[in-house]
Image (spheres, coloured by chain):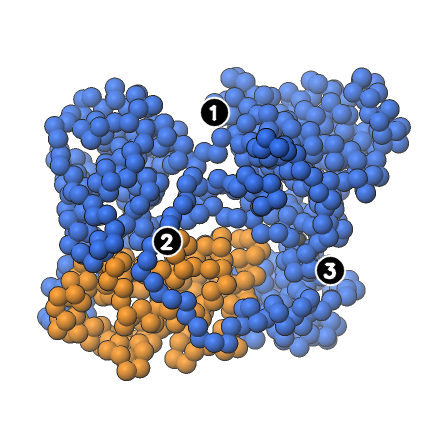
Chain colours: A blue, B orange
Amino acid sequence: MSSTQRGLRTLLGENAVKRIRTSKVLLVGAGGIGCELIKELVVAGFGEIHLVDLDTIDLSNLNRQFLFSQQHIKKPKALVARDVAKEFNPNVNIVAYQDNIMDAKFSVKWFESFDLVFNALDNAQARQHVNKMCVATNTPLFDCGTAGFLGQCQVIIPGKTECYDCREHPAPKSFAVCTIRSTPSLPIHSIVWAKSFLFSLLFGPPAAESQFDETETDDNREELEKLRKEQNELGDLRENLTSPDFMNKLVHKIFMEDIKRLLSMDAMWENRRAPVPLEVPEYSSKDGQTLASQDQRVWTTAESLSVLADSVERLVSRLEAEKEISFDKDDEDTLDFVAAASNLRSSIFGLGLKSKFAVKEIAGNIIPAIATTNAIVSGLGVIEAMKYLAGLDADLRSVNIWRSADRVFTSEKPAAPNPECLVSGVARTTMTAPADFTINQLIEDILKLKLGYSEVSILSDRLLADPDYDDNLEKTLQELSLHDKFVTVIDDDDERVNLEIYITEGPVNIEQVEIPLRPNQSEADSELLDPADSIPPISSKRTAQDAGLPGTTSSAPGQTFVDLTEQDDAIDLT
Amino acid sequence: MSSLCLSRLQQERKNWRKDHPFGFSAKPVKDEKGGLNLQVWQARIPGKKGTQWEGGVYPVVLEFPQEYPTRPPKCKFDQGFYHPNVYPSGTVCLSLLNESQDWRPAITVRQIVLGIQALLDEPNIHSPAQTTAYNHYKSHPDAYKRMVAEQVKKYADY
Ligand SMILES: [Zn+2]
């Protein structure tokens, strides 16, 4: 027995140590927090650990994911973490999967087999998925997350405490199309424009065919032609990517003509600072590469143009082999393009200029990760898990780490589940039915006859049926591939809480279930069923845009829950 | 899709099914797996009575992001739709649909389509999205009228 385990025996008692040794735990994520967690679980003597991560190791991981080193680059995180961690304690059984935790093969049955689960994830979708599976299978979940100096370990005991979804988590801010296309007011708006609009229009997947129809009359032909031109000009640029004159055309169109067109809509600039079309100085793509390496200082207009010209040459030469290119902060060609183009736009609109290094951070939505915070949060997670295994339920705490001089840690007893939560506040049951069982049979024979519903909507990840949508009634569970999945039954009269049914194949049978009435039904309804056709004011004022970095989180204790989600890049700005 | 997004959209669907403004339609589109994709709705918005837009019914696609209702949906007319606040691609520029302006998670599909209907006849010249309709609206009211009338005709028996 190691000294760590002797210490644990003194602290928690022989029984707890035995439970730790015989426990089977799931760890989701082998990144910054996952690496710390698995190390601690192994050293503490947890007997069987299953580790799931889809990613492979990247050079940029090595500064904080200490189980990985140079020779592991491009190898699967889960498998390498298993091999390295095993050296700390050969008695531990580690099972690694290079897989997405949301894959159907990680079924309810599989989740059920664990004594407890750790989340070490950085995206909200996977965190919500694991949370739901844990609540559905009554498996304790220790959800760990960090953002820079901030961190959190939330203890989730299904049925007893709040789950991950019981409170709302702030989503990273998005920007309206008009802000990005016409009226940028912050440097980040220029960066989003360069990355998601200009870059993807030139090098991304080709846009859908123009859908202008041919029904126009002579009267409006000219106007529609103009409108079509406005729509298609960037497409025309794309056609000309390989022309020797391309850079001139690009600069002329994007930084001069388009700006003049915006200026011509003069009402837009009555209460805003008007942009100034670019005056193009002498520049040469020859200097581009050298300048691009000077990533800590802000470039002049001529320097930005040089980098832009050079990066365009590099990107165009890649197009033959690659067909289309998507932005990646670690792809220098794409980053140089975005850094240069965004700064040119910012100077036109009088916004602050940024070094390439700063652009990389903003465009790549990089939240600085701090190894120490990861280590602390992991330690907290393992301590709470040990308390749980030792039967010290009353001592369980959710803990936050703050960047504050007064108080680094705050802890709270996990609150009771939110009755309106869509994960904790629903009824659940299981049923078996054969492959040829239809949706109509489900509704009529089971829901109406056995469970006493009158009208229902049936939902999986899509709407399958409701009183006004009957296309699927004769379709079978097999045709709709509903086996080994949850379907949600929603009471059309809003009286009962939602019912989630997990369907597996077998003879028709449904597990008895009590479906409670919805809490404060009238209140919930009045909020959504707004009877008045009240339209919020359509104002033209621009409110203060204090967006800052995407994904930044509040740092005041008690003010908000730390939430760590990756900014969604998939915005379409057309 | 997050459960919050899905369940809210289902609630919106139910509320719309049970009651919606006269002359409007809005329905999630079919998806290839057999079912309705709640994240994309096809709506049809009639021009308001007594305005020059009356007589047309205008198709609008509502695309709800994963983060809905924290984030607003994106609303699109057909490409090339003639209106000062509609981009040539069809995207509507409206403060109600802007997270930094008037969007709030409690805003319903009903309020969105009514907001777009109101925008048709009350363009906001401070946030123009296309030069053609903007210039007509501001400086050539006759041409504007003519173009809107043409468009009403085009969408009359849509
Ligand atoms: Zn919950």
Q: Which residue is mark 1?
A: A60
Dot 3: element: strand
Q: Is residue A441 visible?
A: no
- At which x and y percent is residue A14? 89, 28
Chain under callout 3:
A
At which x and y percent is residue A528? Answer: 54, 68
**Coordinates of residue A330 in the picture (x, y in percent):** 39, 29
Q: Is residue A163 visible?
A: yes
Residue appearing at x 44%, y 72% in the figure: A534
Residue situated in front as seen by the camera: B133 or A71: B133
Mark 1 lies on a secondary structure that is helix
Q: Earlier in the sequence, mark 1 or mark 3?
A: 1
Residue lying farthest to the front in this orientation:
A406
Q: How many marks?
A: 3
In the image, A305 versus A241, the foreground residue is: A305
Q: Give the quadrant of the N terminus of chain A.
A: top right
